[in-house]
Amino acid sequence: MDIAKCLALIDELCAREFPAEHGRTDAGTGGPGYLTATLETSGDFYEDEEGEREETEARFEAYRDALGDRLGERWGPVQEVGLHGVLDRAMDGEDVDEPWAHLCDHVPDVQLWKADTGRWVGLGVSQWDRELPFQLLAFVTAVDPPRPASPRPRPAAARTPPPSSPPSSAR
């Protein structure tokens, strides 16, 4: 991975206008309020030998962290945001804004910074399925990160009422 090229592409994303419609761009994908780009892609794992997948995952996380260190020098400490809860909420029918709705399908967590432009800049490691390649993604968005999930109430059937004692006059 060439960190200088990745930083240059992130700078380019920060300076670009967001597309009016969702679709492909010359750097990746975009739509109203966001742009994404693939910085690095691994091979696939259809014939995974000797733990190659785990080694590749660790390497891509190290790439993300190294690039994140450089972004942290610019914009301060990283904010880690887990997207599992966002995926759960989207699956339950909640309307989740892009790029978060798309990212939560294949990126378990992201590293975020608020750039000087007021836009969010993020990094994540994507994998759509165990056999498919890992991708190091960068994205820039004007859309705030999703709020944390609130605890779900237990269904009424899961709550057991305390046993009742007979009235004292029935004894």
Image (tube, rainbow, N blue to C red):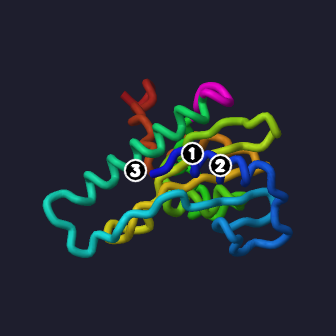
Is residue 155 visible in this depiction of the protein? no
**The magenta stretch spans residue 74:** yes
Residue 7: image x %, image y %? 61, 45
The label number, if any, that marks residue 8 in the structure image: 2
Residue 44: image x %, image y %? 33, 71
Number of marks in picture: 3
Res. 28 image quadrant: bottom right
Question: Which tag, 3 or 2, sits closer to the chain's start?
Answer: 2
The residue tagged 3 is 60
Label 1 Cα neighbours within 10 Å, binned few <14 / some 14-19 / many ≥20: few
**Residue displayed at 39% across by 36% down:** 163
In the displayed structure, does residue 13 sit left or right of residue 158?
A: right
Nearest the viewer among 16 and 124 is 16
Nearest the viewer among 101 and 36 is 36
Marks 3 and 2 sit apart, C-alpha to C-alpha, by 19 Å
Q: Amino acid at mark 3?
A: Phe
**Residue displayed at 47% across by 38% down:** 66
Nearest the viewer among 158 and 160 is 158
Q: Which residues are magenta?
A: 73-79
Callout in the foreground (3, 1): 1
Q: Secondary structure at mark 1?
A: helix
Residue 150: image x %, image y %? 60, 40
Label 2 Cα neighbours within 10 Å, binned few <14 / some 14-19 / many ≥20: few
In the displayed structure, does residue 82 sit left or right of residue 62?
A: right
The label number, if any, that marks residue 4 in the structure image: 1
Q: Secondary structure at mark 2?
A: helix
Please say if the residues under marks 1 and 2 sit with CB atoms less than 8 Å apart. yes
Q: Amino acid at mark 1?
A: Ala
Question: Which tag, 3 or 1, sits closer to the chain's start?
Answer: 1
